[in-house]
Image (cartoon, grey):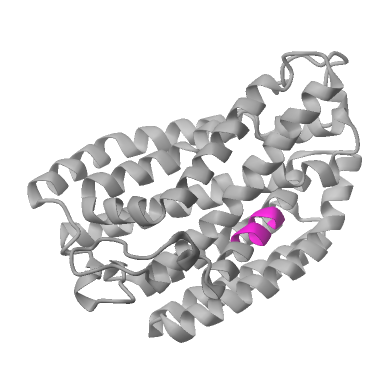
Amino acid sequence: MALTDIWFILIAVLWTGYFVLEGFDFGVGSLLPVLGRDDTDRRVMINTIGPVWDGNEVWLLVAGGATFAAFPLWYASLFSGFYLALLVILVALILRGVAFEFRGKIDSARWRRGWDYAIIGGSAVPALLWGVAFGNIVRGVPLDADHNFTGSFFDLLNPYALLGGLTTLSVFTLHGAIFLALKTEGEIRERARALVLPLGLAAILAAGGFLIWTQADFGKAWTLAPVAVAALGLVGSLVATREGRDGWAFTGTAVAIVSTTVALFGSLYPNVLPSITAAAGTLTTTNAASTPYTLTIMTWVAVAFTPIVLIYQAWSYWVFRKRIGRAAIPASAGLPARQP
């Protein structure tokens, strides 16, 4: 297998990890005004992701860095064409991260309410726009023969990409609700479990339409398998929640996200960014790649350091594995509580 293919697969793996892990973060943040009846409830919800959200974003940073190093032309065309959308995502993620750190600095309901809005927007906006972005990556964008983006921001707001945005938003929100059911106790857990069915039905409708469209227009024979697995994962998560098996329900949504990402990257390959205006402008794993020497060095670095990162992140999830509830929240506003 060529190094270009290996790095295409590795980048797909990095995006898959990001969507699975950051997906429930986005879901929890988006559900803050729905499940958080008071400040204590909202602090419980924030504390479920407090120890891990920043580690989850490492997957995004590594995915971006790997794309820049392995496929510089892909990176350059993406940022020139998706500049405004990516800027909005970046600002949303920054506001969200600042909100997590600053929310409890002042004992003021108005202060916390303002940062709550930042968490909600900083979660829902990226959850929507990542789907729009990947919808356009699979569908293709206007690129000339020199691989320069020749369209406008509004070219990105096509029906297929918008449906992709609704898919990621709905699936991530479902993923977050099930994560809250898995990580909390008491009334918050019950309210989260009650939301799973309506959120699940919305996710099945959006994801089903998006994946069927993807398979019909861009898919290959083998990508039908991950599409089917994604559907089974979503349905299985609803069944598991009904049976009180929160761990299996979370596994179901995680499988659905993994399978959907596999289907998207599988439909894209061997292209990395198709052109819908000039065939010569299409970027592939071959014409967008770095030199073989660069890819070789990157491969050895990845082999050396990836296991360390995975072990550390697995350890952090193990340490903060317990459920939390309102009793774990101190009476004062203070900083977000951490589990022992």
| Badge count | 0
Quarter where residue 218 is shown:
bottom left
Rendering coords of residue 216 (x, y %): 48, 86
Looking at the image, is 63 positioned above or below residue 47?
below
Q: Tell me which residue sits at (59%, 60%) in the image.
A: 168
The N terminus - image quarter: bottom left
Looking at the image, is 122 positioned above or below residue 282?
above
Given residues 114 and 216, the one toward you in this image is 114
Quarter where residue 240 is shown:
bottom right
Q: Residue 97 in magenta?
A: no
Q: Tell me which residue sits at (69%, 67%) in the image.
A: 203
Quarter where residue 122 is shown:
top right
Rendering coords of residue 172 (x, y %): 64, 55
Rendering coords of residue 132 (x, y %): 52, 62
Q: Is residue 161 visible?
A: yes
Q: Is 323 left or right of 53, judged from the image as shown? A: right
Q: Residue 169 in magenta?
A: yes
Q: Tell me which residue sits at (22%, 70%) in the image.
A: 281
Q: Is residue 52 visible?
A: no
Q: What secondary structure do most residues of the magenta stretch adopt?
A: helix
Q: Tell me which residue sits at (36%, 32%) in the image.
A: 308
The C terminus - image quarter: top right
Looking at the image, is 178 positioned above or below residue 286?
above
- Start and end of the magenta stretch? 168-174
Rendering coords of residue 190 (x, y %): 88, 48
Q: Is 313 left or right of 62, judged from the image as shown? A: right
